[in-house]
Amino acid sequence: MKDANFLKEHNARHLWHPMAHPADSLANPPDIIVEAEGVQIIDVDGHRTIDAVGGLWNVNLGYSCQPVKDAITAQLNRLPYYSIFRGTTNDNVIELAEMLAAFFAPDGLSRAFYTSGGSDGVEVALRLARQYHKIRGEAGRVKFLSLKKGYHGTHTLGASVNGNANFRTQYEPLMPGCYHTPAPYTYRNPFNETDPERLAQLCLAAIEDEIMFQDASTIAAFIMEPVLGAGGVIPPHASFMPGVRALCSKHGILLIADEVITAFGRTGGWTGSRHWGVRPDLLVSAKAITNGYFPFGAVMVSEGVAEVFEKDTSGRGAIGSGYTYSGHPVGAAAAIACLRETERLQVQLNAGARGAQLFAGLQALMARHEVIGDVRGGHGLMCALELVADRGSKTPIDKKTIGKVHRATYEAGVMVRVSGNNIILSPPLVVSETDVANILSALEAGFSAI
Ligand code: PMP
């Protein structure tokens, strides 16, 4: 490995970072992570921290998951690549599809379409939704509805349904026909409603109003995260997603669950949809499907949608989506090993228990630090702290102060993620009680530094 000075200098000179201003990366050089072990990461200066971000919400099993590493190595030696475009397939993708169909059976999903990540998956799901209606002779159903604050990747269709201006403004015009409705975000919402259940009802009414305004016969799908993630961990009231499901069914609109973060145990349930008792028509998974060790994803399709494609005799059912790396045999081998480990360890149970511990600790932290305006979580291992300059006006905290909290927490031994004025926590699902206690004490040090 090159030495620390070389790496720091050339990172600044030659590398642009995703989701960062190039000038910002020069002014605030990123930490260079060179090693990882268990739930910890180690930077080039030898500083070891608990990764309370879990990679990027994807390293659910931690960094030392040997069965997944072994599966990747063995597969590289046996068949490092072959395409699954029409005419060929491979043993791994078949075995994995069977396993995914069993895993997602309670969600009513039984066909897999492979991708190389979440943005690809969102794109595929939205395209399949339009195609589904075209096959059925409802070619006018082309629009998409989604939630403000939602995050659905950065491909053009996904960015068009994104509900955060940061990912949209510099790339407009985006796709026409995408409309956004208010998020069930209790801390800030246009209704000034602080009761989660009443807010859920108001948001559902706003969705139905938008459906009527657009004309249901022009809408292909509603896409949503069961718990809004990148937008700041916003769990809705339990009535919300079932309410969206009911509206979609009533108006012939497909429900796409974007479970890039929530599938495979993160919410304390196996999937976010199941957590809320909902069966989506399409479900997008990625991230933890390979524990972050290989870029991979799967869009899961319900029986009802699958039947329309499979029984089509018009030719309109031919799938015109696919990537060179759709069904990569190494990714599929990683996913098979990962799914086995995920189920063997029953990680969703630990996510529930450790998530409750983390959420309670964060609430106690809020009682001690005025700068924390809101604490969100309570559904597995995804939590956020929203920081404000003062609690009365809820003015978002400035970048410099939140940066200081981040730095001091890192120095105290824990990596957290800053997103806008939120600190996001999504540690691996295998964290121990002691790890969570350490995350909380490092955050205490972080907040004490400002
Ligand atoms: N959807 C959701 C809900 C996500 O959280 C993300 C990534 N954070 C994506 C889609 C995009 O996934 P990817 O970064 O793998 O393209």
Image (spheres, rainbow, N blue to C red):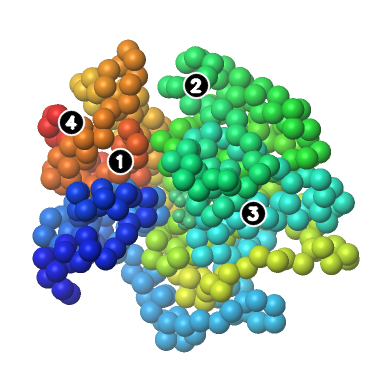
Whole-angstrom CA distance, mark 3 to mark 4, is 41 Å
Q: Amino acid at mark 3?
A: Ala
Q: Disc 1 designates what residue?
A: 418
For residue 125, which numbered disc appears in the image? Answer: 3
Q: Position of residue 130 (x, y in %)?
A: 73, 51
In percent of the image, x 48 and y 38: which residue is there?
164
For residue 189, which numbered disc appears in the image? Answer: 2
Residue 405, quarter of picture: top left
Q: Amino acid at mark 4?
A: Phe
Q: Amino acid at mark 1?
A: Val
Q: Is residue 358 visible?
A: yes
Rendered-image quadrant of the N terminus: bottom left
Q: Is residue 99 visible?
A: no
Q: From what the image shows, is residue 145 above or below residue 89?
A: above
Please give left or right for residue 387 compared with residue 148 in the image: left
For residue 38, which numbered disc appears in the image? Answer: none
Residues packed near mark 4 inside 10 Å, few (<14), some (14 to 19) or many (20 plus)? many
Q: From what the image shows, is residue 302 above or below residue 198?
A: below
Q: Nearer the viewer, residue 17 or 300?
A: 17
Q: Are marks 3 and 4 in contact (CB under 8 Å)?
A: no
